[in-house]
Image (cartoon, rainbow, N blue to C red):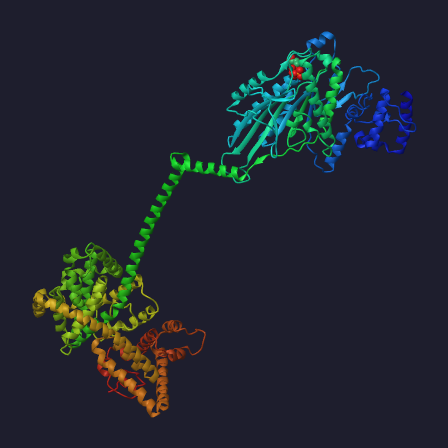
């Protein structure tokens, strides 16, 4: 042997010279191929004297291991060889070097069995024999042999494992560092197995009892900390005694059969599986298992376990709430706590009979387990003899399968058990190379998913059925808050709608005020005609009184804001004069008026009359008694017929009653439509004056007729207002300006009539007063007739506007004189009495147009009329310089869109007058021409001046540019 060894040493030296030293140091014997392995085996046999190397064959390079760093692998391959300890005890084993290289290369290290070695203390029996401890833990992972060995024996002196526990380590430490991680993986859906492997009496049961209890405690603690998942724990226990499987939870000792399930693998038939209620329940079952397990007394252990015990805890967990398919998986895994029976030698245990038989079964199953582990440590390519024993068959999934596995190898430190301890270490060496393939066992079949969803539905239904729960209460509170919010929004909406209606009604009032302007102007003209039958100064005085009276009345209404000024429809049958008296008795009828209307009327009147508060000076009773017209007004009754009769008396004989009634009916109808305009209508009509030309054709905002001296100033204002709709402020301003003008006239009128007493005026108006006291029957007749007359008046107004527009177009086509157009336009404003003039003008222009076109003289006549028009425009051009100041001219240029930087601005303006047929343009043109023509200022233009003429050539006095030349008679 020595010679062989010497030769081997010589060859090894030669080999070292051939190979790089580093490479040899890093190589593991297991990786050097089968040939070397065979040579080593031959060398081992040769060392035992069992094998003689054939001639010519080289002996195994035993000396190769002397310089090798990996002593852990040597015993597996060189059983019985004496391996010198490594020179560097802290050197990294070769397998770990390889793993570190793999990790550095970025390769994922495969999961292997967690292998720990635990030394128990020397027991009393061993101590008596004087067996000391040959083993020492030199570190947390290295176990050193310190004993003396026969010179011939060859095994490593140092062993390295995942964890090494000395005899001083507690079971708790063993659990924490060698088993806890694996055991608790069952909570993550990963199968786990914890083995205790070792010779008899080495402390397997002692260790596994503690590890099982600690694991169960930790599992329950984990479950308590995770209430979001439901856990179902099931416990089963079995033992393999003499190659028979027994159910430890069942008193029946009948051996159980092993079945092969395609999904679950090997299952134990009819094995009791208890669903754990709690931890106490588990402890009870553990006690049952302990009591049921086969235990026998041997020479080495008074309570030697004669069977392999497998305690299995199955953990199924699922989320309590459905959080999606990915987060609601059901996990199912089991953890096996395996307390193997200890290998034993019959000579040591002194067993015989039954114990010997048990020992043989134990050793046989453990041998199979060793084979499986060894085979698994080599890889999965070869046959793995799982089925050679029921132990390996049952634990097949835990051995290199879908499970995490921890093996705690227990060993006795006594010198007498060195062989058994060495075998244990060899088993551990193989076990730590076994690669496992643990996976999370997710159970989420369609059936499980349906079950989960049904549970979720049941939970939700339960919440709905019991509204007292916290979630439902919060929902009800939220609904209540939303209801309150909706109510608030509805109230705000209601207020906004009311405001909108109010504004709309006010807007409608203003529009109706504007639309009623025609009627008011008609009434004003009626006053004018009635005044024509009397001397002018008298009529002016009368209407001055009317103005005073109007102001007086309005101020009275301002002083009585609580009294609505709504006029009943019947009272609007009368004209403006009647309205004075009607409004005097308005408080009497106020109770009959809807409050809403009264408020609106009051609002309008306030806007109109706000500027007249300073006229309270004229509210004295003396102001009401100085003219006959005043007495006449005061004596008027509220009835319509009285008003009509009174009105008829004021008119000239040529005006029949029917026409008046027609106008009044129209006024009635308008007042019925809008009773809110009564105040405005009243004030306007009372200020109508003689020979005043209101521009009502184009100015709808004019509420009063200005005095003769103010017509042009008034017309200028109206031109500005024709461009836009009047607002309430504008109306108020206009009323204010009008009232200022009236105020001056009123003051003079007061001074003129101061000495007149009331009785005198009453006498003057006695006939009117008597007529006011007519029977009520006549009032009814008049009301019936008035409705018919209203329709007639409306149709007339429509015809008038139509005819008016046609006349304007004919003027344009026939190039009629501008002055003629202006006077005609300003004098005829829709009064029914003007119909004859309108008709004459229309027929005249139509005749001229048709006749001239038929005779072929149109071109010549048109040229002549155009020439005349140009002359007129030239006259107007000159008049602008005379009649208008520079500021007025500039404002006119701006209004008419003439560039202030351009030349001949006056000429441009004169060329633009009366060039379009739009009502707005016509109105502005007429106002401007009226301002430029001095004759209109004198108020001498009368309708009778328009005669029937079929000639287009006006006779115009170009020097004075007066009306004389325009009259066709
Ligand atoms: N780490 C230890 N510390 C103290 N006492 C121990 C330790 N390990 C084992 N023992 C004691 O050793 C004796 C044998 O232990 P145990 O029965 O667990 O051995 P075993 O391996 O199960 O034997 P067997 O295989 O015959 O059942 C017991 O009395 C136990 O108390």
Residue 663 picture location, percent across and down = 19, 72
Residue 778 lies, in percent from the top left, at: 9, 68
Quadrant in the rendering for residue 859: bottom left
Quarter of the render that holds ligand 1: top right
Is 712 positioned to the left or the right of 482 in the image? left
Residue 500 appears left or right of 34: left
Is residue 807 in view from this perspective?
A: yes
Front residue (pair 887, 381) = 381
- Residue 443 lies, with reference to residue 800, above or below; the image says above
Relative height, residue 333 to residue 507 (above, below): above
Q: Nearer the viewer, residue 426 or 834?
A: 426
In terms of image quadrants, where is residue 393? top right
Q: Quadrant of residue 722?
A: bottom left
Image x and y of residue 809, in percent: 33, 80
Residue that sits furthest to the top in the current view: 128
* Residue for point 62% across, 28% down: 192
Numbered marks: total: 0
Against 563, residue 439 (above or below) is: above
Q: Is residue 601 above or below residue 228?
A: below
Q: Residue at x 23, y 64 (%)?
A: 673
Q: Is residue 745 visible?
A: no
Say left or right for 80 vs 215.
right
Front residue of this view, candidates 955 and 184: 184
Measured as percent of width and height from the top left, residue 668 is found at 19, 67
Residue at left 75%, top 13%?
Answer: 416
Split into 4 quadrants, where in the image is the C terminus? Answer: bottom left
User: In which quadrant will I find the N terminus?
Assistant: top right
155 lies left or right of 265: right
């Amino acid at each position: 042997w020595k010679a062989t060894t010497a030769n081997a040493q010589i060859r090894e030296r030669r080999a070292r010279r051939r190979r790089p030293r580093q490479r040899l140091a890093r190589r593991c014997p297991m990786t050097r191929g089968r040939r070397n392995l065979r040579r080593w085996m031959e060398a081992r046999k040769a060392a035992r004297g069992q094998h003689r190397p054939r001639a010519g064959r080289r002996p195994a390079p035993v000396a190769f291991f002397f310089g090798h760093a990996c002593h852990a692998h040597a015993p597996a391959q060189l059983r019985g060889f004496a391996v010198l300890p490594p020179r560097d005890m802290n050197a990294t084993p070769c397998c770990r070097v390889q793993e570190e290289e793999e990790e550095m290369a970025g390769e994922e290290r495969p999961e292997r069995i967690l292998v720990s070695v635990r030394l128990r203390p020397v027991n009393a029996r061993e101590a008596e024999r004087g067996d000391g401890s040959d083993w020492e833990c030199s570190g947390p992972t290295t176990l050193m042999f310190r004993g003396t060995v026969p010179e011939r024996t060859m095994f490593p002196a140092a062993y390295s494992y995942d964890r090494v526990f000395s005899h001083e380590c507690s079971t708790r430490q063993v659990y924490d560092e060698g088993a806890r991680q694996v055991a608790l993986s069952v909570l993550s859906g990963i199968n786990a197995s914890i083995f205790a492997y070792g010779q008899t009496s080495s402390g397997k049961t002692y260790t596994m009892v503690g590890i099982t209890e600690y694991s169960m405690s930790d599992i329950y603690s984990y479950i308590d900390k995770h209430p979001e998942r439901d856990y179902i724990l099931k416990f089963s226990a079995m033992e393999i005694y003499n190659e028979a499987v027994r159910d430890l939870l069942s008193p029946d000792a009948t051996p159980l059969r092993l079945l092969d399930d395609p999904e679950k693998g090997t299952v134990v038939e009819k094995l009791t599986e208890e669903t754990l209620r709690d931890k106490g329940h588990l402890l009870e079952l553990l006690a049952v298992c302990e009591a049921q397990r086969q235990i026998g007394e041997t020479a080495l252990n008074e309570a030697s376990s004669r069977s392999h015990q497998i305690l299995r805890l199955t953990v199924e967990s699922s989320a309590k709430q459905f959080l999606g398919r990915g987060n609601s998986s059901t996990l199912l895994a089991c953890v096996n706590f395996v307390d193997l029976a200890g290998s034993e030698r019959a000579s040591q245990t002194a067993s015989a009979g039954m114990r010997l038989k048990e020992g043989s079964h134990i050793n046989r199953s453990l041998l199979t387990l060793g084979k499986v582990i060894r085979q698994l440590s080599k890889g999965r390519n070869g046959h793995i003899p799982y089925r050679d024993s029921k132990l390996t068959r049952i634990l097949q999934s835990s051995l290199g399968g879908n499970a995490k596995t921890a093996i705690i190898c227990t060993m006795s430190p006594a010198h007498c058990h060195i062989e058994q301890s060495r075998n244990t270490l060899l088993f551990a060496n193989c076990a730590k190379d076994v690669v496992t393939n643990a996976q999370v066992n997710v159970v989420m079949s369609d059936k499980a998913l349906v079950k989960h969803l049904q549970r979720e539905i049941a939970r939700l239904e339960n919440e709905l059925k019991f509204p007292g729960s916290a979630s439902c209460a919060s929902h009800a509170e939220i609904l209540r808050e939303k209801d309150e919010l909706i109510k608030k929004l509805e109230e705000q909406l209601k207020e906004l709608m009311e405001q909108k209606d109010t504004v709309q009604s006010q807007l409608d009032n203003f529009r109706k005020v504007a639309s009623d302007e025609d009627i008011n102007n008609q009434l004003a003209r009626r006053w004018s005609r009635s005044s024509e039958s009397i001397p002018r100064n008298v009529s002016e005085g009368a209407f001055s009184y009317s103005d005073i009276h109007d102001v007086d009345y309005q101020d009275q209404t301002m002083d009585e804001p609580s009294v609505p000024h709504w006029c009943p429809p019947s009272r609007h049958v009368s004209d403006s004069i009647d309205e004075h008296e009607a409004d005097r008795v308005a408080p009497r009828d106020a109770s009959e008026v809807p409050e809403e209307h009264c408020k609106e009327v009051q609002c309008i009147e306030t806007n109109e009359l706000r500027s007249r508060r300073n006229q309270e000076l004229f509210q004295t009773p003396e102001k009401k008694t100085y003219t006959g017209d005043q007495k006449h007004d005061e004596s008027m009754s509220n009835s319509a017929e009285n008003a009509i009769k009174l009105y008829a008396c004021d008119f000239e004989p040529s005006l029949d009653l029917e026409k008046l009634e027609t106008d009044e009916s129209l006024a009635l109808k308008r007042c019925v439509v809008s009773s809110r305009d009564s105040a405005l209508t009243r004030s306007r009509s009372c200020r109508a004056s003689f020979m005043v030309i209101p521009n009502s054709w184009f100015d709808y905002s004019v509420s009063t007729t200005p005095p003769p001296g103010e017509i042009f100033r008034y017309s200028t204002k109206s031109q500005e207002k024709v461009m836009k709709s009047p607002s309430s402020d504008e109306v108020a301003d206009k009323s204010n300006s009008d009232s200022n003008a009236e105020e001056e006239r009123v003051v003079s009128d007061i001074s003129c009539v101061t000495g007149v007493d009331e009785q005198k005026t009453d006498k003057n108006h006695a006939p009117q007063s008597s007529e006011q006291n007519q029977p009520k029957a006549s009032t009814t007749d008049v009301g019936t007739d008035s409705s018919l007359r209203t329709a007639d008046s409306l149709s007339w107004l429509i015809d008038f506007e139509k005819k008016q527009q046609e006349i304007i177009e004919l003027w344009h086509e026939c190039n009629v004189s501008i002055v003629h157009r202006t006077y005609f336009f300003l004098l005829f404003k829709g009064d029914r009495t003007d119909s004859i003039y309108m008709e004459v003008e229309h027929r005249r222009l139509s005749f001229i147009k048709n006749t001239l076109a038929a005779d072929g003289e149109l071109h010549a006549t048109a040229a002549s009329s155009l020439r005349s028009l140009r002359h007129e425009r030239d006259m107007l051009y000159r008049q602008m310089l005379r009649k208008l100041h520079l500021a007025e001219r500039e404002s006119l240029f701006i209004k008419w869109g003439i560039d202030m930087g351009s030349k001949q601005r006056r000429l441009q303006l004169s060329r633009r007058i009366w060039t379009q047929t739009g009502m707005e343009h016509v109105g502005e043109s007429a106002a401007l021409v009226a301002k430029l023509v001095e004759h209109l200022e004198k108020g001498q233009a009368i309708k009778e001046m328009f005669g029937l003429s079929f000639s287009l050539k006006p006779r115009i006095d170009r020097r004075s540019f007066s009306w004389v030349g325009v009259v066709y008679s």
